[in-house]
Image (cartoon, rainbow, N blue to C red):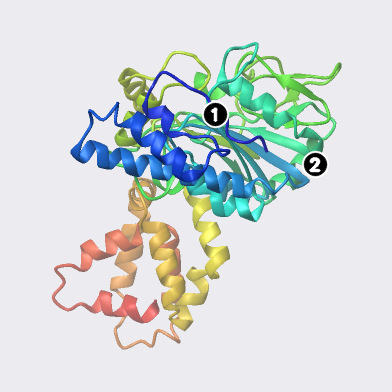
Amino acid sequence: MTPLRAVSPKSSASKCHPSPRQPLSRSSSKCQRSCNDGGRASGPIAAACSLLCAAAVFAVWLQASAAAHPPRGTYVAMCLIVKDQHRDVVEWIQHHRNLGVEQFYVMDHNSSVPLILELHPLVNEGLVQYEYFRDFTHSSGFPQSWAYDHCLQHAKEHNFMAFIDADEFIMLKDNLTLPQLLEEYESYGALAPNVLIFGSSGHETRPPNTTEAYYKCAPLQAEDNRHVKVIANTRYTLTAGPDPHTFLYSAGKFAVTERFQRINGPRSLNVSNDRIAIHHYATRSREEFRDKVERGPAHGNIGKSWEFFDLVNAMSTEVCLDGIRDATSQTQELEGDPLHSALPAGDDTSKQAMFSAMERAGYYQAHKELTKKSLEHAFEQLEGISESQSPAEDDAAKKLMHSAMKRAGYFHAHRRRTKHSNSGTLLARSRHIL
């Protein structure tokens, strides 16, 4: 892993990234003088700068201490370029780790405070290879292309390497891990899945979890969903191409869709996501989109505007729940199946895991739009159950509750129906069953 580069950009704030070869005390003092603009800054500004400098110096020390971990050979790896996305990167890594990815290359492009502060535990574990860079030299002139080619220097360590962004999440539909799926594409230059564009789903502020929060997406055959992202077969991949969707391959090799259709360029002829899709949370919440506009684009193209935000939301007319189901299934795997094991046993841990996963970010609303009539029918039947019946013996009641819960609008609708109930019969009955 290449050590942090010491350069002298014009911005005084960026001077708060000292060289790891400098003693920490000297680096901190130099940073403080630069950031205080020759002593003219004072008060809260000076205090804030001091904290920033201390964090930057400590980040460099962490990176130096982590340099002893070489890349580990794995079947599939991922390459990511980020800038000032401290709150996004760990969630992104954990999601793809759950799919079977065992090595990540994180290229940190000039973040105001290096992301090593967030990633240090994963770097120490050997899961993440981290590099901070500001200046670079590449024929394209784009930092993203430089980062991708830099990752490809480790191609011999892996069979496949995926190149996607921090707002893009791979979703699988075959109950396979990513390595298992990729085995079917070993004779091709790359697997290039289609993206699926998501809007803000009405979120004004950042939700706790990306994949569980956003469910409003563009129709499958929308023009923008023809874009692909590349999971490159490192045996046949030469360099990054002219854009983030394209790579150059050995003679006779090329990228294919999940249906093994050849792709020439950044778009496929048709859109398919029967087995794999890349959910592109293009806007996320209004708060996060504002941060995105301020960061600017990674590939030197035109930056995003608020017109783009409105356009994506206008096209996101479909309800897409695969991300929510994927997150919920991961919760079930970690905690046991809450819908089954919690019913007879009253397992508070499993129930809380399920409630937490379902309550996050629009889950109820999405399902309510799809299942309103069937839920109303379920509640009518539930209200007809006699209070004298034993929950342990009433299999029909448990199955009915199970069905309602799986539709996922249950908890929200149930609270509304029982809030003003005089008898409280349904609420008491539900507690017994749960």
Residue 23, x across and y down, in percent: 52, 43
Of residues 12 and 237, the one drawn nearer to the viewer in this rendering: 12
Residue placed most toward the observer, 410 or 148: 148
The answer to whether residue 322 is visible is no
Q: Position of residue 3 (x, y in %)?
A: 62, 36
Amino acid of disc 1: Ala
Tell me where residue 433 appears, x and y as whole percent: 39, 78
Q: Are marks 1 and 2 in contact (CB under 8 Å)?
A: no
Name the mark on residue 6.
Answer: 1
Eyeballing the image, is 102 above or below 249?
A: below
Residue 183: which disc? Answer: 2
Q: CA distance from mark 1 to mark 2?
A: 42 Å
Residue 160 visible in the displayed image: yes
Residue drawn where x is 17% and y is 79% of the image: 423
Question: Taking 379 as reference, is 328 above or below it?
Answer: above
Identify which residue, 36 or 161, lies in the foreground.
36
Q: Quadrant of residue 261?
A: top right
Q: Earlier in the sequence, mark 1 or mark 2?
A: 1
Q: Quadrant of the C terminus?
A: bottom left
- Residue type at numbered disc 2: Glu
Question: Along the horizontal axis of the image, is 44 left or right of 336?
Answer: left
Residue 339 drawn at (x, y percent) = 48, 69
